Amino acid sequence: MTEDSIRPQRARTLTTEDLLLVLFQPDSGTIAGENTLFYVLAAGVLTDLAQRGQAAIEDAGIHGTLIHAAGEPPEDELLRPTWDYISQKPRGVQGVLAANGPTLRRPVLDRLIERGDLREQKRRMLGLFPSTALVDGDSGRRAKLVAAMRAVLVDGARPSDDIAALVALVSASGSLPVLDREIPWSAATATRAKSLERGDWAAGAAAAAVTRTMTAVVANALIVGAVVANR
């Protein structure tokens, strides 16, 4: 499996969408890390904005790291609310995640369903009560993303910027071990994932370097948020 084989499909998607798709567990129909999912998706949005040159970070000294809007407002309606929020004034990353994450799950899920990456299946609990279950779609995109992640973490392949960001955010969310059947969990895997969380990957272009830095900042915020949420 090569990176080139997934690029045509991924050109139309966001890191935020990839996150939810990879966290979906086909065997159970559940999404890993539901209790902190809003943090994770909000972190994905900030990464997407950084990739597009529409968000940047600044060192505010004793006030820590702040995030502010850059460039033109995004046309994508999934990204625009966060851009509007950080365009009002520079914001702390934890505040951005908390303010913009809670509304993201359903619209991101709707995109994956519309694209055929996931499907909603009508069922009846105990044969009586109607319910809706998530099942893997027929696009094959989740399998390709997971294969690309495994190539980086297990085989030592050099990641593209988008796969590096995806691995870093899944790892920072604490959900990477859940993918053990697909991406074998080991000390080496954990070490590689942690290096990507810190932004330790090659980034040639200036925009890629901004993405790497933003990913490291939001990954650290995710770790803190997960600790607080699980207390």
Image (cartoon, helix red, strand yellow):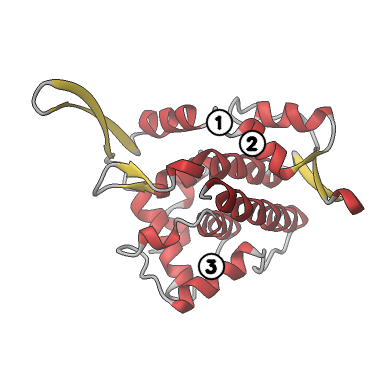
Decide if residue 199 is on the left or right side of residue 24: right
Q: Which residue is mark 2?
A: 98
Q: Is residue 82 above or below residue 61?
A: above
Q: Nearer the viewer, residue 55 or 161?
A: 55
Decide if residue 119 is on the left or right side of residue 69: left
- Amino acid type of disc 2? Ala
- Amino acid type of disc 1? Pro
Indicate the quadrant containing the N terminus: top left, top right, bottom left or bottom right: bottom left
Mark before the other along the chain sequence, 3 or 1: 1
Mark before the other along the chain sequence, 3 or 2: 2
Spot occupied by residue 69 in the image (x, y as percentages of width and height): 79, 36
Q: Which residue is mark 1?
A: 102
Q: Which residue is mark 3?
A: 193
> Could you tell me how far apart the alpha carbons at marks 3 and 1 are, in whole angstroms?
26 Å
Decide if residue 16 is on the left or right side of residue 141: right
- Amino acid type of disc 3? Ala
State if disc 1 and disc 3 touch (CB < 8 Å). no
Residue found at the far right of this picture: 61
Q: Quadrant of residue 177?
A: bottom left
Spot occupied by residue 113 in the image (x, y as percentages of width and height): 36, 31
Residue found at the far front of this picture: 231
How many numbered discs? 3
Q: Residue at x 38, y 28 (%)?
A: 114
State if disc 1 and disc 2 touch (CB < 8 Å). yes
Which element carries disc 1, helix, strand or loop? loop
Decide if residue 135 is on the left or right side of residue 77: left
Spot occupied by residue 12 in the image (x, y as percentages of width and height): 51, 38
Residue found at the far bottom of this picture: 188
